[in-house]
Amino acid sequence: MFQKGLKGVVAVHTKISLVDGENGVLRYHGTNVKELVLDYSFEQVAYFLLNDKLPTEVELQQFNEKLKEGRYLPLHVQKVMDALPKTISIMDAMRTAISTFSTAEFLQMQIMEQAIVLTGALPVVISRHYRKQLGLPIIEANDNFSHTENYLWMLNGTIPTSTQVEALETYLKLTMEHGLNASTFAARVTVSTESDLPAAVTSAIGTMKGPLHGGAPSEVLNLLEEIKDESRIQLVIEEKIKNGEKVMGFGHRIYKTEDPRSILLREACLRLQGSDPWLDLATKAEKEIIGLLDKYKPGRKLYTNVEFYAAAIMRSIDMPAALFTPTFSVARIVGWSAHVIEQVDDQAIFRPQSLYVGKIK
Ligand code: ACO
């Protein structure tokens, strides 16, 4: 049996997330993400994904301490990063930095501890290389800040507003995990050979880098920039449909109803409305675009996907496009780690077959 791209093939049993495309529901460990996103912090949702339970106060404190430990990069990682040229992309710098974590000392830690340290380290790695590319000095982590606040602090060197933190944190919690996507699969394949967590995360970052996986929000941004004003929505969209172009941020391979992450990000945008013209434009554009898609592509059930509001939120917090995929990874490293731990617990090496279709000489 051959299925190109393994489309539709079930490759693992998982208890981490359920992506229910028919009903438009995403569940982490059986719980609707809606409940988790509205009521809990990044740290609590990450703990939940990794442990299948919410933390007690003491467990959360220990988790936070470990996460903050990750903010202090080992000296050799700093040196490797210092040696990287500015022209290397942030995703490549992340891949290189994470690959150098696998010292004997690091690997002696429990895999769960390794996962928390790497999750804490990734924003530091990103901000360090981002600022180097801009020729700006490194901003040290601030232990008084939460994971999300500290990420924005280290990127910009200014204390983020609560509005910015809420917007980014909603995005991070919603994109932490999404089944057996390409990067998560890469992480599981790597560790299925009894390799280690830094190697699995390195594979995942290399896979996430490709535009078909991690790069879509910047395309949506181009669309919003092209629209500029609500009076131009119809003109821009009709032009795209006439030219046979796809409207970015609409439609999804799995969700044939509204993408639940999009609904929650829209709600976050509505809560923040008035704070940024990009959020206002996005919420106004959505309704009109869905109407136009229904008129010109009837019956295709085209709704916004997660990328549409992700782009609006990123734009509203002044996150440059070069940081979109790295920021997606700041969230997804939690899902990668949860899958690596699940793979280790239910070990079987991935070794599918290939069918030789060449000549016999
Ligand atoms: N704009 C206009 N028309 C669309 C769109 C769109 N965004 N999406 C689908 N259609 C139309 C197609 O033109 C096609 O019409 P036809 O029947 O006249 O040929 C029909 O709907 C079915 O399209 P497919 O591409 O076959 O739908 P599929 O479900 O396979 O594709 C996909 C899903 C790839 C996401 C598609 O909707 C798309 O390209 N969207 C725009 C890009 C985008 O937003 N990508 C991010 C996805 S979310 C993520 O990756 C995390």
Image (cartoon, rainbow, N blue to C red):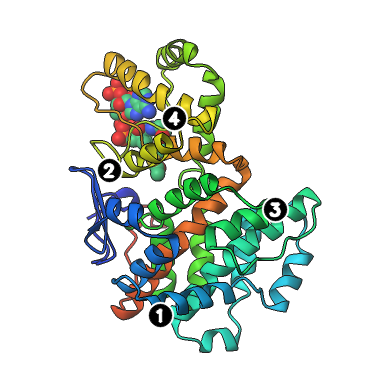
The disc, 2 or 3, on the residue closer to the chain's N-terminal end is 3
* Spatial CA span between label 2 and label 3: 33 Å
Height in image: 176 above or below 14? above
The disc, 1 or 2, on the residue closer to the chain's N-terminal end is 1
Which of the image's four quarters has the N terminus?
Answer: bottom left
- Mark in the foreground, 4 or 1: 1
Label 2 CB less than 8 angstroms from ligand 1: no
- CA neighbours of label 4 inside 10 A, class few (<14), some (14 to 19), many (20+): some
- CA neighbours of label 3 inside 10 A, class few (<14), some (14 to 19), many (20+): many
* Spatial CA span between label 2 and label 4: 16 Å
Q: Which mark is residue 130?
A: 3
Q: Which mark is residue 174?
A: none
Label 4 CB less than 8 angstroms from ligand 1: yes
Q: Please, what is the three-letter code of the amino acid marked with disc 3?
A: Tyr
- CA neighbours of label 2 inside 10 A, class few (<14), some (14 to 19), many (20+): few
Query: Which residue is under mark 1?
Result: 58
Q: Residue at x 31, y 80 (%)?
A: 345
Q: Is residue 263 left or right of residue 58?
A: left
Q: Is residue 172 left or right of residue 356?
A: right
Provide the secondary structure element on which disc 1 rests. helix
Q: Is residue 78 left or right of residue 160?
A: right
The disc, 4 or 3, on the residue closer to the chain's N-terminal end is 3
Q: Is residue 195 visible?
A: no
- Please identify the quarter of the rendering in which residue 126 is found: bottom right
